[in-house]
Image: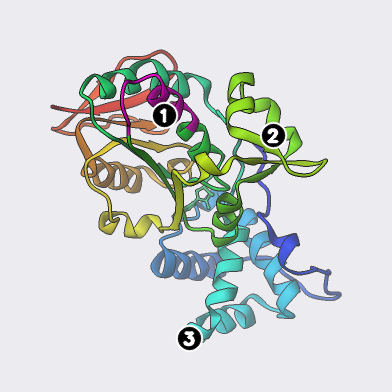
């Protein structure tokens, strides 16, 4: 999947500056990765140096900084830089996503996770970690709502999407998407949960939007997330940006938020050799999922 420079175009026009040499040397790379990790928990692997440099350069062009050191000073100069931090984060994170992105994982939710949970007649609470612009959270909400509507009586469910990127969360809350995204949603769900709002866009209907909330949460703060007893945690295409030890640390923390029988779904291949005393692997083709012991 191609990396993009996030939403930078939407937040300022970037023009190349003549005569500025902007190669990032080892020392600069070490300084920047340290700053990003310590301030916001964003890990940039060595092989992504050019991605880091180009993200920073795009903000430098907008802010008029001519050197990495000048922009570094500008960012480090106190809390008044919150907006610039937010825009930089947006350039340095990849927000590629779509509805029902990983078919097998979504089938696992629909065919295994939901039926098992509703056998026990309980509400259903989902966390989409690293939700980007919301497509994943709404896809899960569609599956859960459809399952609820087949159950007798009133069923409660809620989906929370979290991400570090404020512009992405803003987009997610609006729940409005370009028409080309429509084809990723199956036909019965298109009718039930989506409405055309302009010639080029559709929106998730209000009934479903009110079941889904979005909030900023950085991975480094996961252990303090205000959740408990979740039925499902869905975390895909986020761990891939972190090194192995950090991935283990994150999934160990995520496991703490599950209720007995709750399921953690990762992207296939995103984690090797994870062992946790309370978590057992779920066998379902082309997925990577773990169930919290009852
Ligand atoms: C590639 S998207 C994945 C979206 C969705 N989960 C999917 O699979 O389609 C990765 C998301 O993780 C978010 N992210 C990256 N680093 C993060 C961090 N340290 N804390 C929270 N979110 C982060 C990015 O902002 C981005 O929206």
Horizontal placement of 210 versus 19: left or right? Answer: left
**Residue 197: percent from left, percent from top:** 74, 43
The label shown at residue 46 is none
57 in relation to 284, above or below: below
Element assignment for label 2: helix
Q: Residue 256 appears at what percent x and percent y?
A: 21, 44
Structural distance between the alpha carbons of marks 3 and 1? 43 Å
Residue 127 visible to an observer of this rendering: no
Q: Which residues are magenta?
A: 142-155
In contact (CB < 8 Å): disc 2 and disc 3:
no
Q: Is residue 120 above or below residue 225?
A: above
Depth check: give the residue in front, 253 or 190.
190
Q: Which mark is residue 181?
A: 2
Q: Which residue appears at 69% of the width and 34% of the height?
A: 181
Which residue is outermost to the front?
Answer: 153
Give me the residue at 47% from left, 43% from top. Answer: 238
User: Which residue is disc 1 drawn over?
Assistant: 144
Mark whose residue sits in front, 2 or 1: 1
- Above-or-below relation of 207 to 213: above
Image position, residue 77 (x, y; %): 51, 86
Identity of the residue drawn at 75% across and 33% down: 180
257 with respect to 72 (left or right): left
Residue that carries the numbered disc 3 in the rendered image: 78
Which structural element holds mark 1?
Answer: helix
Q: Position of residue 169 (x, y in %)?
A: 54, 55
Label 2 packing within 10 angstroms: few (<14), some (14-19), many (20+): few
Q: Is residue 259 magenta?
A: no
For the residue carrying disc 1, how many other residues have a C-alpha within 10 Å: few (<14), some (14-19), or many (20+)? Answer: many
């Amino acid at each position: 999947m191609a990396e993009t420079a996030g939403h930078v175009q939407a937040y300022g026009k970037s023009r190349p500056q003549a005569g500025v040499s902007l190669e990032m040397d080892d020392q600069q790379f070490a300084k920047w990765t340290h700053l990003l990790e310590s301030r916001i928990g964003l890990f940039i692997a060595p092989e992504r140096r050019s991605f880091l440099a180009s993200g920073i350069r795009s903000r430098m062009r907008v802010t008029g900084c001519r050197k990495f050191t000048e922009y570094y000073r500008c960012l480090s100069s106190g809390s008044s830089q919150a907006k610039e931090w937010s825009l930089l984060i947006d350039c340095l994170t990849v927000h590629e996503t779509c509805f029902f992105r990983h078919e097998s994982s979504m089938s696992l939710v629909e065919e295994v996770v939901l039926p098992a949970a509703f056998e026990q007649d309980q509400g259903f609470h989902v966390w989409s970690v690293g939700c980007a612009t919301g497509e994943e959270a709404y896809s899960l909400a569609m599956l859960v709502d459809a399952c609820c509507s087949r159950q007798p009586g009133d069923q409660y469910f809620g989906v929370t999407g979290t991400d570090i990127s404020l512009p992405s969360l803003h987009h997610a809350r609006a729940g409005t998407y370009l028409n080309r995204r429509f084809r990723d949603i199956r036909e019965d769900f298109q009718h039930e949960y989506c409405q055309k709002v302009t010639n080029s866009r559709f929106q998730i209907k209000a009934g479903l939007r009110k079941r889904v909330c979005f909030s900023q949460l950085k991975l480094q703060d996961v252990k303090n997330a205000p959740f408990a007893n979740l039925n499902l945690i869905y975390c895909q295409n986020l761990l891939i940006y972190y090194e192995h030890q950090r991935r283990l640390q994150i999934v160990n923390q995520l496991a703490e938020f599950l209720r007995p029988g709750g399921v953690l779904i990762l992207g296939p291949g995103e984690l090797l050799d994870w062992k946790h005393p309370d978590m057992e692997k779920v066998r379902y083709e082309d997925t990577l999922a773990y169930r919290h012991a009852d």
